[in-house]
Amino acid sequence: MSAPVTPYTSFLGGRDALVAVRESIDKVRAITSGWTDDRFERSYAPGKWSARQLLIHLAQTELALGIRARFAVSTPGYAAQAFDQDAWIGLDAGLSGPEALDAFLSTAQMNLAFFARLSPEERAITFSHPEYGTLTVDWVLHQMAGHQINHLRQLERV
């Protein structure tokens, strides 16, 4: 099965998506180790989300995409619902930096275990999305992997 093309494909650089997710989880954990509350409130660039907000966004995306993949595998004819990341970010604004980090690491680890046990047939299951059309579960995995790398690079700049 050839790798699907997502908006984040370039971030993978041809690497296996499961390997990339595993590495991203480890790298996020390593670079944030020992961060103070102040460090979580810093941004990688003026006017951009703080590290805490990036981690909230990553956790929310893990939730949304993980749920999409689970519904696709378990619900024939599943149609995904789009979500607005800017509307969502404030929903969990009460999380501290360490709490946002824990939320991301936990959901990402859960998703990694889920995707790792899927068969090729399950990864090929299709579902519909209002913006992207027909997608596969494998597309979701590749989207998640590239998305994590994109934001990992931003966290590295904090």
Image (spheres, rainbow, N blue to C red):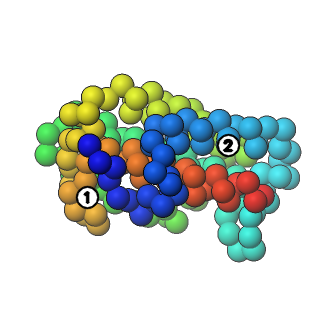
Which one is earlier in the sequence, the residue at label 1 or at label 2?
2
- In the image, 78 versus 45, the foreground residue is 45
Residue 107 seen anywhere in this rendered image of the structure: no
Q: Position of residue 126 (x, y in %)?
A: 20, 47
Which residue does the image show at 31% across and 36% down from the upper left?
A: 70
Q: Position of residue 141 (x, y in %)?
A: 39, 44
Q: Quadrant of the N terminus?
A: top left
Q: Residues within 10 Å of mark 2 (few under 14, many from 20)?
A: many
Residue 28 got which mark?
Answer: 2
Closest to the observer, 98 or 105: 105
Q: What kind of element bears circle 2?
A: helix
Residue at position x 45%, y 43% in the image: 17
Element at badge 1? strand
Left or right, residue 110 beside residue 72: right
Which residue type carries mark 2? Val
Q: Quadrant of residue 105?
A: top right
What residue is pinned by disc 1? 129
Q: Give whichever of 124, 94 is nearer the camera.
A: 124
The residue positioned 45% from the left and 27% from the top of the image is 113
Locate the C terminus by quadrant.
bottom right
